[in-house]
Image (tube, coloured by chain):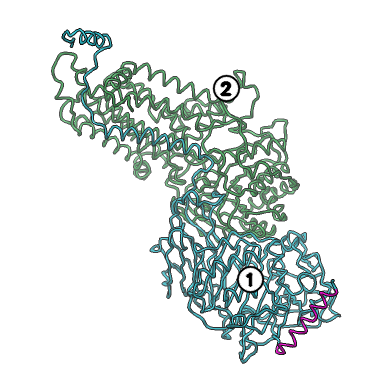
Amino acid sequence: MGLLSDPNRRKALTGLLTRLNTPICIVCYLAGIVWFMGLAFEPFTLRTYMSENAMGSTMVEERFSSGERALSLAKEFDAHKRKAGGMPVEWLVKAMQSRGLEVFTQSFSRKLPFPDENKERYMVRGTNVYGILRAPRAPRTEALVITAPCSPGNTNNQAVALLLALAQYFRNQIYWAKDIIFLVNEHDLIGTQAWLEGYHHTNITGMEYSPLQGRAGSIQAALSLELSSDVITSLDLVLEGLNGQLPNLDLANLFYAFCQKLGVLCTIQGKLQRNDWDTAEGYTHAAQTMMLMVLKQACGRSWGDHGLFLRYHIEAASVRGINSFRHYKTDATTIGRLLEGMVRKLNNLLERLHQSYFFYLLPSLSRFVSIGYYMPAFGLLAVILLLRALDLWVHLGAPALAAVDGVTEAEQPSSPGVLTVLTPVVISHLTGVALYLLPVHLQEMAVEHFPVSETEAVVLTAIAIYTAGLALPHNTQRLLSGEGTEQGWKVLKLTALLYLAVLLGCTALINFSLGFILAVTLVPITASITPHIALYAVVMVLLSPAFTILYCVFIYQELIEAPVSVSEGWMLFLSVISQGILDHALYGSLVYPLLALFIYPCWLMFWNILFWN
Amino acid sequence: MLILSSLLLFILTTHSEALTPAAARDEFQEELVIRPLHSGDIYASFQFRTLWDTDFLQEGQKVSHYRLFPKSLGQVLSKFSVRELHISFTQGFWRTMQWGQPFIPSPPGAELWVWFHDTVSDVDGNWKELTNVLSGIFCASLNFIDLTNTVQPSASFKPLGLGNATDHRFLRYATLPREIVCTENLTPWKKLLPCGSKAGLAVLMKSEKLFHSSFHSQAVHIRPICQDEQCSSKAWELRQTLNVVFDLHTSGQGKKEWSLFKMFSRTLTEACPLASSSKVYVDITDNPELFELSPATPLLGQAVVLGDRRTYSVYDLSRAETFGQLRSFNLLLRDMLRPLLHAERYVAGFGLQTGEIHTVIYNNHPYRAFPVLLMDSVPWYLQLYIHTLTVTSKSRDNKPSYIHYQPAKDRHRPHLLEMLIQLPPHSMTEVTVQFERALLKWTEYTPDPNHGFYVGSSVVSALVPSMVAMRTNFTQDQPLFSSFVPVKEESSYFVRVYTEPLLVNLPTPDFSMPYNVICLTCTVVAVGYGSFYNLLTRTFQVDEPSPPLSKRLANLIRRMRGVPLLT
């Protein structure tokens, strides 16, 4: 601080920063990107390790052996499911009761704000069935949850059957210290949401549900199981939850440890691990895995039933069986043993999982990047905004420099009215509010006047409002008296830069991936923008939040090795928007409001600068 | 030497008996009740009762001769002027919905409540010492009972013995929901029995089997009672109870068969020679014709307990012909009878700032409403918002007719909330209150702070309408399990229901990173605060730039020469 209180040295420092501003910014941007890409390089990452003592040293022996029985049970379940035309509630209740569990049901209903075309549902009614295995001599204070979604069609029968087989086996063991809840939920995430809200007696999404009759204290951890075939080739671990929340890294470590022990192939993001990190292919593979995680985390939706548990401070992960017709096969008994081992170790926990990291990226299951390593990549991008802001501040504060031309108009324009800045800010935000509110509320009117379905109406309204926002600057200028001044846009840009820096900083703290992706696209154009250059306008549009989503769709499809054509990509883009709005309404995902209410208005402020004169 | 000492002992005892011809009469009874539960589990309840016609609290008379009554407890009673003492250690939670009512209920963990004699001046001091002494006697962590978890309930815990004291200043109640009960607590408990675990029913108490069960609870109740029906003089009663529920599902491979050997891995060989009565009761109320008890017994008994008339096969161990082994016990399941009164509790909400405690009380009586007393003792670090207290039954506001609330003092005493609520027939009553989680000082966290903090069970006490007439007359030959709580009227019986304890997470700092925390704090203080303070307090003034070194040297030389200085 001595540096800043000494006027001479302060002058020297700011002089240096303003003189070298552009080169420094370019270097920072490149360094940020390189740093981020370097995170996937194996020598730069750490090997995962079990931090929790209670799970590390205590070895358990897996004895589950009724995998075959589980498969025949799956057939029985399938038959009953067909007969009931949905979830066979009565059969499940009887099956759980006969296995010695305390069984309860919960019915729920939810009217979606508009029809979900991906899953073809609008009015959702369903029933959750759950059985509680009471641990002997435990006072009902702690519980673990194993859940299997009862999906329509042929999928997930094996998961439900394995759940029942595990329940039967677990019931005869004496070592349980925590109650175990076996939950079969209908309508995947909506069912889970209803159950969790019922269990915690909250209502955050306007769900209607019947109150739960049986509880088992505070839930310590949850596992979600998805299996659709009798034999699987690999198990995939899904961690990304609502709003980019991740479970404690120890849960991933636990899964990996048991896969190693039982010799099961395990993947993350559907990608197997490779050992050739020193080759280009090896690095690309790791980078792809990490990029997939970043994209999934950034979109803020729950990628499995586990994702909704995280809000309630319950560490949860989904285990998904994949049958990719490789030679390597794993039978149901082994999967049962894997789950048995994991649940037993979780049962041994004295405290909640808290020892390991909550903020991490995984380039592979055995390697991780902690928050301390990935944050500098974002920091390097964010500092550009601050540097540009400093530059502008110095220019605004030193009229002498501006008056180099010799004309003495120094004093008058240096104080642009508050109104000059405030008007675009307010109008941009009002557009954001319109973008947030109107699509869902105007759907009826849109359906009346145009030949589109409700879903299309919502998405197209959103896009229309988004595009209409681009026309605003001209109107804004008309509202203001007189021409915009040089000082005016600089003040506006300074405000917008600081606003964007704060926004991105906060976003990155909560959901690094989202913050980073937005920073990569928004920072270069916002940092360099000046009024009235046609080229800027094109680049500005191409790097706007909506186009960022479009690029993410294409990159994601490319990474999961299912590339799409432009028209398919466009359709996917539309469905991503409708899913985003639905996720917000159904589960409280915050990405849509964040983009509509903050990021888009902020971007509009920069758009205003472009049309300043 | 050995002979000499035993001779000495003989002389001493005969001598003392000769001196006090009216020696205090004492008596010991033991009893085991086995009841197959609707869920298929087996409930075994031991009761041992020692009666002694003496008075520990009489002025000027020191009781020093003990026969059946354990001396360690007797001395404690007289030293601390205890009028009534109830202590229970429980591992597990009694599942009222599956198992019905227990004979003597107890909350998970340890529970201790004591009525002191009204001559005691320093009740808190006595209480503190008493808990420490009991902690030693029972090998338990009762010394963790202090003022922060002790309450004085005004209505829920009335004395069960003689006397009608109502001044709750002499009552102390505390629970330790986290207390873990194991063999180390069982051994001292068994030593209090006159026969120890050498003979009588206590032979069955092999800890390996007792702790291989779904529920385990052991308790000691001491109280003064009437000697006879006229109540002319006082006797002290010590009841030791032990309740176990065995899970046949886990151990029996699905068969509903049991035998004493299978449950306890011991058999009974003889009654305790010191016992005046020693009996085993087997509840055969449900479908008696489907039972096959071996050996069969001609004795049948009936008892009205907890509002239900039940039939028992009675085995009298003091008769020689009884000995054999009970085995091969087949039984069909019957539709579960819902218990008339039932309560449960949970924490609602998410996040680490606020929460809501929900207590749900069920009245399953088809047409009778009855009042219940709800007692809640919540630690100070959950700061209750008492203005948010709501009581609703059948979605309507149900105003409690009596509320006793004592707010907590941080680090000194817990919240105490007692309410008298009328439960409408066949209804569910929900009591909710919001709370805020306090941020503790860093030394106040337990060694495993991320496990959470316990809130003890809330207690629901009620006089529940009985389906059959209760017996109000007091007789000596009643079975022990039906005579614990005195019955005052025919039409109802007393029930106490404990809810589950709660495990609540408080905002917890990351203790594994003290180094980081210290570094960060120091940096913030040094860089942030220090420099801002510096900037704010420093006075700025324009400083003349000092002349360069060459000029200063030149001036020095000029000054020496006396020439005008350079500027």
Q: Which amino acid type is shown beneath numbered disc 2?
A: Thr
Disc number placed over residue B100 in the picture, else none: 1
**Chain under label 1?**
B
| Direction from residue A45 to residue A460 in the image, left or right | left
Q: Can the viewer see residue B468? A: no
Residue B479: quadrant of the picture: bottom right
Q: Secondary structure at mark 1?
A: loop
Residue B18 located within the stretch drawn in magenta: yes
Instruction: Name the spot of residue B232 as percent of width and height, x first.
Output: 61, 91
Q: Are marks 1 and 2 on the same chain?
A: no
**Main SS class of the magenta portion in the image:** helix
Query: Which of the chains is green?
Result: A
**Chain under label 2?**
A
Residue B454: quadrant of the picture: bottom right
Mark 1 Cα-neighbour bin, 10 Å: few <14, some 14–19, many ≥20: many
Q: Nearer the viewer, residue B417 or A437?
A: B417
Instruction: Name the spot of residue A310 as percent of width and height, x first.
Output: 52, 45
Instruction: Name the spot of residue B381 as percent of width and height, x first.
Output: 46, 57
